[in-house]
Image (spheres, coloured by chain):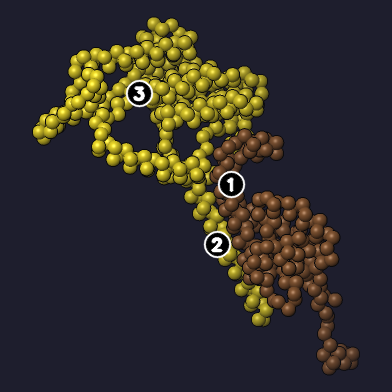
Chain colours: A yellow, B brown
């Protein structure tokens, strides 16, 4: 009887140990998944490395660099990461084509150009499919691929350049705050929020924006094999639906991931399986990034208070 | 009741004798497989998504090529470190407390001190006898050395068992 009792106690202790070990594993794995950005714990999804067509997501704002947070990814796309993925996929002999899943309103002109250039450098067939939005810089990226698929209601086009900043001079005047200007080079403090830009500065800035617009138009015309005049007509900055985009020659076909799969299977004459290419952040990367960003932010804060008077003027395509 | 039964009862003779012998290799292997299956479910399972996210399992060569090319494998090393620690805790704790892991309990084999007067093995002994589970050099070599030593030693001891002065035994009824 006593032996039976001790055996029962032993099994209870063993079960408790197993449960504790399981809980520790689950908690650590859960925390790591959140940090790394694996949001779905569905084990049925395709693991990285098991397909023959690279799938590269381009989501959110396209920037040259993004910073992920431990409480969730930044949700934006870094051109450095995408270019790295394109180059890796291009070098991988088991990858037969590269597909871009686009859902982005655009972003930095430089970042878009970097991605578009990398696509054009790739030796493999490239296809993109636009989900909700493939506008501006994101359209620039899509135009560099061999074929563009869209949903009927996708937003495409919006070929234009935008720049803006907040200007506080009226507010400062109201509170009797004056802006003391010291510059060497008369346009050096252009974009300062503490004074209104002069007409001369406005004209000069417009010239710069127009020049960027020209580059954008030129790129789209070359990528889509369209005349510059035709693209210029469409490059009002306004967007088109996927269906209108087909009629205007901005995109090729109606379809999504499945249609892209069918198209590639026909083109490559083989069964294809997508494999997602994403920049993988390691824990050390992440912690390093967080600490360097934190230190940088502190330093920047102090620096700004002491010397910086000029705000960031962002230009987006 | 027969007369002979009464005779034996009066003499109070044992009905059977229990002897301790070295655990059979088959039992030990099965015990390890059971432990591995449990640990695969409880400890490795939650990390499966992270591992799959980082390493392609399309084939040995693909995985090997990927590991050679991939420079940022820190996360995988962190996962391996955590999993190994938990696996070690499982074996050390259970063998220290009960002289048996779950696999050994099911296969009815025990870990004992070589000196049978000492009832329990120490934590250090439990750790040392499981040192081959550490996935780092030179302990990885034990995966080759251990089975060879096990076959050729008198009491079917692994090298790490010899070092930790422990034995794996089973009880047989005679």
Marks 1, 3 in one chain: no
Camera-nearest residue between B55 and B145: B145
Task: Work out whether mark 3 precedes mark 2 in sequence or the reverse, and give the earlier one.
Answer: 2
> What element does badge 2 sit on?
helix
Q: In the rendered view, does B172 fall on the left or right side of B50?
A: right
The location of residue B109, given as percent across then percent down, is 74, 67
| Observer able to see residue A264 | yes
The location of residue A307, given as percent across then percent down, is 25, 34
Which chain does the residue under circle 2 lie in?
A
Residue at 57% across, 49% down:
B79
Residue at 85% across, 76% down:
B174
Determine whether A39 is above or below A158 in the image: below
> What element does badge 3 sit on?
strand
Residue at 83% across, 63% down:
B153
> Which residue corresponds to mark 3?
A316
| Observer able to see residue A36 | no
Q: In the rendered view, does A107 fall on the left or right side of A258?
A: left
Q: Quadrant of residue A309?
A: top left
The location of residue B59, given as percent across then percent down, is 69, 37
> Which residue corresponds to mark 1?
B77
Camera-nearest residue between B103 and A176: A176
> Which residue corresponds to mark 2?
A20
Which chain does the residue under circle 3 lie in?
A
Determine whether A212 is above or below B60 in the image: above
Q: Quadrant of residue A44?
A: top right
Q: In the rendered view, does A259 fall on the left or right side of A164?
A: right
Please rate how many residues cluster around mark 2, counting C-alpha atoms within 10 Å: few if below 14, some from 14 to 19, many from 20.
few
């Amino acid at each position: 009887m006593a032996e039976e009792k001790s055996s029962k106690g032993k099994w209870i202790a063993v079960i408790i140990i197993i449960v504790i070990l399981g809980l520790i594993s689950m908690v650590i794995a859960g925390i790591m998944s959140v940090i790394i950005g694996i949001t779905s714990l569905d084990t049925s999804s395709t693991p990285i490395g098991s397909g023959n067509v690279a799938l590269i997501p381009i989501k959110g704002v396209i920037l040259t660099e993004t910073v992920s947070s431990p409480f969730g990814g930044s949700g934006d796309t870094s051109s450095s990461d995408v270019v790295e993925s394109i180059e890796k996929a291009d070098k991988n002999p088991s990858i037969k084509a590269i597909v871009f899943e686009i859902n982005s309103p655009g972003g930095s002109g430089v970042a878009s150009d970097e991605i578009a250039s990398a696509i054009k450098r790739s030796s493999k067939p490239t296809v993109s499919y636009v989900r909700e939005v493939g506008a501006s810089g994101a359209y620039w990226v899509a135009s560099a691929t061999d074929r563009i698929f869209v949903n009927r209601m996708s937003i495409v086009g919006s070929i234009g350049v935008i720049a803006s900043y907040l200007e506080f001079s009226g507010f400062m005047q109201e509170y009797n705050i004056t802006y003391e200007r010291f510059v060497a080079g008369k346009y050096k403090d252009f974009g300062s929020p503490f004074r209104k830009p002069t007409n001369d500065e406005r004209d000069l800035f417009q010239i710069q924006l127009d020049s960027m617009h020209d580059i954008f138009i030129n790129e789209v015309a070359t990528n889509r094999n369209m005349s510059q005049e035709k693209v210029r007509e469409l490059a009002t900055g306004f967007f088109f639906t996927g269906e209108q985009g087909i009629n205007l020659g901005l995109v090729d076909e109606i379809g999504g991931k499945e249609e892209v799969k069918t198209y590639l299977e026909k083109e490559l004459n083989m069964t294809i399986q997508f494999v997602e290419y994403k920049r993988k952040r390691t824990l050390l990367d992440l912690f390093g990034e967080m600490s360097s960003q934190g230190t940088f932010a502190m330093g920047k804060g102090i620096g700004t208070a002491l010397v910086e008077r000029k705000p960031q003027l962002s230009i987006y395509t | 009741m027969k007369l002979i039964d009464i005779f034996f009862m009066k003499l109070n003779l044992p009905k059977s004798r229990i002897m301790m012998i070295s655990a059979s290799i088959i039992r030990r292997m099965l015990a390890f497989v059971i432990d591995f299956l449990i640990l695969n479910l409880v400890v490795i399972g939650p990390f499966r998504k992270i591992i799959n996210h980082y390493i392609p399992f399309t084939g040995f060569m693909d995985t090997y090529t990927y590991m050679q090319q991939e420079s940022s494998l820190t996360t995988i090393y962190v996962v391996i470190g955590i999993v190994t620690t938990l696996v070690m805790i499982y074996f050390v704790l259970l063998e220290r407390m009960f002289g048996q892991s779950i696999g050994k309990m099911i296969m009815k084999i025990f870990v004992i001190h070589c000196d049978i007067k000492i009832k329990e093995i120490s934590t250090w002994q439990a750790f040392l006898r499981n040192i081959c589970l550490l996935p780092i050099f030179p302990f990885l070599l034990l995966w080759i050395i251990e089975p060879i030593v096990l076959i050729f030693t008198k009491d079917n001891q692994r090298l790490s068992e010899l070092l930790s002065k422990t034995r794996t035994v089973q009880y047989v009824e005679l």
